[in-house]
Image (spheres, grey):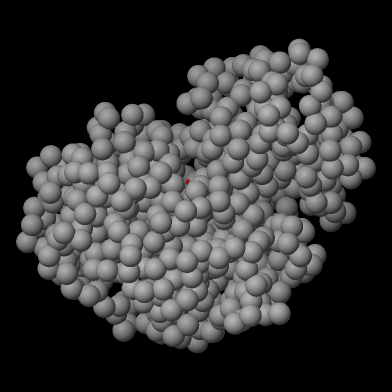
Amino acid sequence: MGFTIAEKIIKAHLVEGKLEKGSDIGLRIDQTLTQDATGTMAYLEFEAMGVDRVKTERSVAYIDHNTLQTGFENADDHRFIGSIAKKHGIYFSRPGNGICHQVHLERFGIPGKTLIGSDSHTPTCGGIGMLAFGAGGMDVAVAMGGGAYHITMPKMVRINLTGKLRPYVSAKDVILEVLRIMSVKGGVGKIVEYGGEGVKTLSVPERATITNMGAELGASTSVFPSDEITKQFMIAQNRGEDFVEIKADEDAVYDEIINIDLSTLEPAAAMPHMPDNVKSIKEIGEIKVDQVLIGSCTNSSLRDMLRVAQMLKGKTVHPDVSLGIAPGSKQVFNMLAQCGALDDLIAAGARILECACGPCIGMGQSPNSKGVSLRTFNRNFEGRSGTADGQIYLVSPETAAASAVNGYLTDPTECDGYTEIKMPDKFYINDNMIVAPASVEDAKNVEILRGPNIKPFPKSDVLVDDITAPAVLKVEDNITTDHIMPAGAKILPYRSNIPYLSQFCFKQCDENFAENCKKAGKGIIIGGANYGQGSSREHAALVPLYLGIKAVITKSFARIHVANLINAGIIPLTFKNEADYDKISCNDELSLQGIKTAIENGDTQFVMTNKTTGDSITLNLDFAQRQRDMLIAGGLLNYTKLSSK
Ligand code: MIC
Ligand code: SF4
């Protein structure tokens, strides 16, 4: 029996466990990345582990999220990250150099290697055949210290691509089609692999758009084969020596196969407020558009920008539309300037934004009230744009450009003037904004620059046997980490200040959540299916920990968030019978008596009592041994300290 691409890479990196679906496996991690919104916390945790120098082949710290500097906080955090990177052997990508995933793909990613990053879109590098996972900051800190990264061995999904995209139909339309088929929870517990003849028609940036948005499926990761096209990309990045071929065996076995004929795809959009709420542009119709934004780690490559420039050349952005464009990296920006395409964008009236996440994470460019905003981004969760009633549609660069000119949602296949975008034989290489770490000798003298905004992160205590606490909040299906711990320009500067952040926790669901938690002293959260989908931010676990949350009980969890809860020492439990969700109301007194003993004994089920109603409710204790040990120790940091004694 042959192996899939992912199985091959896993096999080569397996340090614990077996290649058996559903079992806990530990992987050796070759590379890590962090960004600034999760990085400050990740490096504080790395410091707490007391490791002098990273043990990975390559670790990179990027500054790309918190780039709006309306006070000292973000700038201080950037300095902190720069100094800690220098001291501990980490490369530092300075603000202005670009979005972590775009830059990592260009300059650092290597086919066949493993990468984890404190950002959920780390699977972008799957576009060059790397096995790349989004993870919580603590997991990244452990990997930097040489520890294994643990996941549940996923199932394998194969997406067979045939045919070729029609002019102006885009890689974004491919992943939107996959989202339409699989939904935002369809990828949980799975790795999505692409194969088939159609793969050869997709360039690396197009592949990366697709693997990037695999995060929206809830998938563990997504990966393309590394082939001749990957090789040409690596050579063009002056990194030909890093290329290795990697493809699935002919007789590899998949748990699920999905067939997509690229030639039949239509331009599509994910409508408000979920990435899987997908319809074709034709079906949605010619709605009036207020704003168009092009960029983000999903669609900010040179290929995408050149396509947009080609479509805007000689035209003017519609008078009722504001068009913002953020190239994904300095390399892309430089090359746009060199070839004159930047001139076309400026002349058309685009507002050129810096190479950063920017509006994707609510760092500026919030749309007008009820404004319809077309974005080439990957998430359109309610409120994420910074405008509570903003109507965000996720679209391809082609659809975005055509609509920006017309002022209404436009199917780009109706546009003329199509020309092929050719990938360059050589990208412009200038790594002057990547700072190498200090030598081991010099590192001793590097001072860590800590601003006053950095507060200690909350520590969890060892688990107790009897937890009785009120259900402080009950929420529906598909709650995102943006609900749990919102981001945006006003809040993001406090990612290293958990006490301050706590006042914003769950605000969109319950205005008084933080206050109620404080009054109750401790609490339990009740959630629906796919709880915690979206980002990797461990703040969505650390802030509830700070507010006294002891357990979260749901119908099901998203992968990274459940790991973050365990890392923080909060018990994630699921209902044995989903219908029992209805047996709990907000403020009911819930009793988890004997929970520690049950976890210690390896029990797989546990009966909780709802003291208010008298109901007994059976919950799943679906944990690997290592997770049990972590919960008992009170989270990953305590566990790491205990196990290294
Ligand atoms: C996001 O797109 O939601 C983010 C911001 O990049 C997050 C990380 C964060 O919250 O800092 C992610 O995707 O993990
Ligand atoms: Fe940045 Fe948006 Fe990508 Fe998150 S999804 S890394 S905020 S560009």
Please say if 18 is above or below 541: below
- Residue 220 lies, in percent from the top left, at 60, 57
- Taking the spot 71% from the left edge, 15% from the top edge, the residue there is 588
Q: Quarter of the image holding residue 368?
A: top left
Q: Which of 386 and 37 is in front in this view?
A: 386
- Residue 25 lies, in percent from the top left, at 75, 62
Quarter holding the C terminus?
bottom right
Please say if 394 is above or below 146: above
- Residue 602 lies, in percent from the top left, at 89, 45
Please say if 120 is above or below 166: above
Tell me if I can see residue 130 in this picture: yes
Name the side, left or right, on which 378 lies relative to 543: left
Q: Which of 222 and 253 is in front in this view?
A: 253
- Taking the spot 83% from the left edge, 45% from the top edge, the residue there is 628
Name the side, left or right, on which 18 lies relative to 532: right
Name the side, left or right, on which 231 lies relative to 320: right
- Residue 156 lies, in percent from the top left, at 62, 65
- Taking the spot 36% from the left edge, 59% from the top edge, the residue there is 172
Q: Nearer the viewer, residue 234 or 147?
A: 234
